Amino acid sequence: MKMKDDTIAAIATPPGTGGISIVRVSGPDALKIAGQAVRLRSGKPLASLKPWAARLASVVDARGAQVDEALVVVMKSPRSYTGEDVVEIQCHGGRLVSEKVLALLLEAGARPAEPGEFTRRAFLSGRITLEEAEAVLELVEAPTEYSLSQAAKRLRGELGQRVREWEESLYSALAAYQAGIDFPEDVDPGLERATREIERVHREIAALLERAPLGLALVNGIEVCLVGPPNAGKSSLFNALLSAERAIVTEVPGTTRDVLRERTEWNGLPVILLDTAGLRETSDIVEMIGVERAEKAASESEVIVYVVDGAVGLTGADRSWIEKWRKEGRRLLVVVSKADVSPRKAEEEELRKLTHGSFVLASAKTGEGLEEIKTKVTGWFSRGGEMDLLVPGSARQVDCLRRASSSLGEALSAQAEGWTEDVVVICLEEALRALSELTGKNVSEETLEQIFSRFCVGK
Amino acid sequence: MTAITGKYDILVVGSGHAAVEAALAGARLGHSVAIVTLNPENVAGMPCNPAVGGPGKAQIVSEIDALGGEMALATDHATIELRVLNASKGPAVQSLRAQVDKKAYAAHMKRALGDAGVTLLGGMVVDIPVSSGAVRGVVLGNGDYIAASRVILCTGVYLESRIIIGDVVKESGPLGEPAAKGLSDALRRLGIALGRFKTGTSPRIAADSVRWEELKKESGAPYPLAFSFLSKPRVYNNDVCYSTYTNERTHEIIRANLHRSPLFDGTIRGTGPRYCPSIEDKVYRFPERERHQIFLEMEARDSDEVYILGLSTSLPVDVQVEVVRSLPGLKEARIVKPGYAIEYDRILSQQLKPSLEVVGIEGLYSAGQINGTSGYEEAAAQGLMAGINAALSLEGKPPVILERSQAYIGVLIDDLVSNVIDEPYRMLTSRCEYRLMLRQQNADQRLTPLGREIGLVSDARWRVFEEKRAKLEKGRELLGKKTGGVEVRERLKAPDTRLEDFLGEIPELALLPEDVRAEIEIEAKYSGFIERQEREAKRLQRYAGKRIPPGFDPSEVPGLSREARDKLRRYAPATIGRALEVGVSPQDALILLAYMKNRGSGGAQGDE
Ligand SMILES: Nc1nc2c(ncn2[C@@H]2O[C@H](COP(=O)(O)OP(=O)(O)OP(=O)(O)O)[C@@H](O)[C@H]2O)c(=O)[nH]1
Ligand SMILES: [Mg+2]
């Protein structure tokens, strides 16, 4: 049963805001529940911590295995954000790890907090003012009338103008269909013209989305592909970069065969990391397919991380792969692995030339260079023009456009496949509802407005 | 005070479509009900076109039927021609439309009122006594005082109505009935804000003055159909509808006389509906159109009057004669009743709760055109809901409020109470965001269980419902069978595959009745789209759609501002979204949300 005073937990930082994410537990049992998942370095119980002091701790699962290293802060009622006992766990392992931490807390008896529930508790306990509560809620609550009108105000400039123009074309197309439906005896709605309009808008939105790579990356995740010779340490890096034992690692060259994909988050950006088979000529049929897949994955991803085996050094094959992708203008980062055992300082000069400085010495074992890899990769996506799209709300804008585009695609294929008009209309309305999240219009009212101004209907 | 001359549980003012359903619902739920109306002879009349249904409206009629209302049964009783509109445009928008014998329709309703024990009283209501915030009854023009703790206003277009034909303006109701005078002032005294609307109708002509052979005959569907889930489907096809077009001459006459139209000379100030424009409006606004379609509908099978659909007008009578005679087949037509515009008072519907009770006056309900709607169907639906809710409140039960994702009636009432209605409101499929879920043909499956719970669904109707439900379940199961290694359900998702294609392979399907087969076919074929609508409905309910429980008392909530308390009490918003719209501040809404969350799930119902 959900009581006023049960204990809630949630990830308190919005996705895509930074490397550290905070998992927050609030309620009378906050210390007890968090105590089951958090072990202080000092070995003392959580309750002994001085309020507001940050301490290093490990987060462990039910079997005692470490999930993450974290900073832990304890706040005692009433001197906390919510006015209740609160434990904040600042995870370093990114979104995925913080989700695991949250899962542990829920297992230990916390209830997932509803959107805005911390803020509501904070407000109810008198900890924050109304204005503050409002401002926070605006960030966490999904579309409400209020946020829609705010969104509409934010939608300015060229994009705003284009969205409004698309919207107008789509409304007139929708009105053509709907006039024929609601006034079946009255009108010849001119559906062919409507279809042409839908096609045009669909094309234009798709074109815009294509030109917004970061926007899309924010929604879909940036694909980062690890490639390189066998045994170079790709899978080890893969695991280290994910902070998880995901791929099999052995000393046998040719261990990885299929392409592995994992979601993670680097510096607040969603990343899809790919591990691949080592690149080499081989007669093993399974491995051969693996190598083909590796090449394909690399050619389709947005970032290639080429791993040079630090224990072997730069080979002729390495040089030609690196040259090839550089010439193709790909985003390429060269990583020299196993820096802990064989620091290859001697080759740094050649590497600098070959890669135009875009290389990192790293070790999966010690963690050296891992942060540098993340920073270099995400740096490509937060520099210069692409930075513009990082303004708050842009991910949502891209998402709205993407939904609109996919609904329009469905409207067109429904029509081409011979579905009835009601289905076409529903897809069109969905597209307009997606756009309305940007412009704040009421779909039903706008459609009627169009029907009555454009068609002579009614008896 | 005047002597009490009668006492009822529920008093219904008016005798149109809203009134009839309200009275029947109240009486069938076991309460004593009286109707007070200007002319007790005039029950469930059709002063506009003699037809029931059409896109959006047909769905409403079926929903009324599923809940245990009377409209569909009366329609089936009185139908003279029945057709399917939008047959090729998909199940979401397919709708029946019946042309009815208006005398037979009214007779059916009168009989039903008698059977249910509703008392019919003649009189003009001039006052509504209210004390301690609750309604006490009505006072009639002759001084009689009839006591009732629930009063449902269904006065249609009669409130202070005036009829306008050219430069002739007359205080009158439709078709020569008297206007209702005095009640508007009484409502204003109660603090209820009124607005003024306008609507209009077409001239009627003598049937024997029409040259039918010059017109195109419109036919009904050649296969059996029915509105009510209880009626046996029949073919109704009686040569009662004909069509033709206006022509250049018609338009010339209208243009030459526009200056004599009360619409254009400023006589009419009320707002008219966009979807029901007068012919002069159409000619004026769409000058490029060379012709407008006109339908001639008989008002009964052997009617001597014919309704001209599409020729609504308030031009002077001499112009009307010219216009009518410019049409093919009508060169010698005699106008029996001229077309007219009518202006009337209506209640601003934002003052209503979703139960249709007037905010701030316990026991006073309003339904139908008085709330700013147009159409018999829209009126009947509101009457039914007001009748149900008045009855439930007498029993101390919470009102029934239909969701937008549950019924067109839910959309109708939600639109009325949430939005500013600035023209007579007519239901259209485009108003309903979940129309693929809310099909006319599944209204029974959606609403009959609710009707049963309310107490309006008879045993006979319940039996029919349960039988169909069992067959639907059987049918859905059969769709799980495989042909060619693929479930039929999956194969039906191709737009050109029909259920009939599988009758050979799965003979049990052929044993199911046709309506059941049609339903399961639609469910399977459109499942992807239907599920999407269901998801969307759920998503919206999570946010602005979050309901404030009916009967909620704002004084229980600590920390709410006084302003918010006043607004919550005054407007009784049904949802958080609506509370924001009536001006409750986001801060107060937040407090409300937190309060509801804590209380709503806090085990008040003991639902551990
Ligand atoms: N000392 C040291 N050894 C490493 C490091 N990274 C990988 N190794 C070792 O190198 C060997 C190969 O590592 P993997 O990660 O399997 O290499 P891979 O590139 O995925 O190999 P294939 O899948 O066979 O192509 C293993 O024995 C690892 O233990 C490192 O940073 N330091
Ligand atoms: Mg590997």
Image: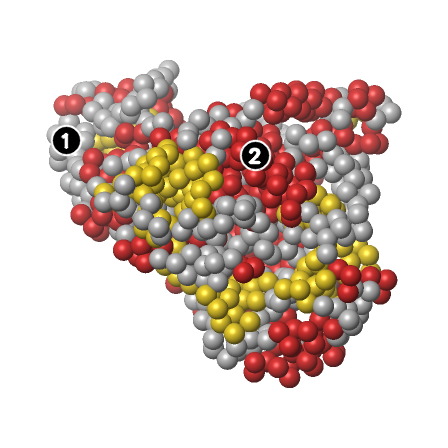
Mark 1 neighbour class, 10 Å CA radius: few under 14, some 14 to 19, many 20 or more: some
Q: Amino acid at mark 1?
A: Ser
Q: Chain of mark 2?
A: B
Q: Residue at x 63, y 64 (%)?
A: B337
Name the residue that disc number 1 marks: A77
Numbered marks: total? 2
Q: Does A410 sit left or right of B44 as displayed?
A: right
Q: Nearer the viewer, residue A302 or B489?
A: B489
Label 1 to label 2, Cα distance in Å? 67 Å
Residue in view at x 63 percent, y 70 percent: B279
The residue at label 1 has a CB less than 8 Å from ligand 1: no
- Residue beneath the point at 52% across and 25% down: B452
Q: Amino acid at mark 2?
A: Ala
Q: Which mark is residue B112?
A: 2
Where is residue A257? Give x, y as percent.
64, 30
Image coords of residue B497 (percent x, y): 80, 37
Which color scheme does this rendered protein use?
secondary structure
Q: Is residue B467 visible?
A: yes
Name which residue lies at 69% across and 81% down: B252
Where is residue B10 drawn, in percent x and y?
A: 39, 36
Q: Chain of mark 1?
A: A
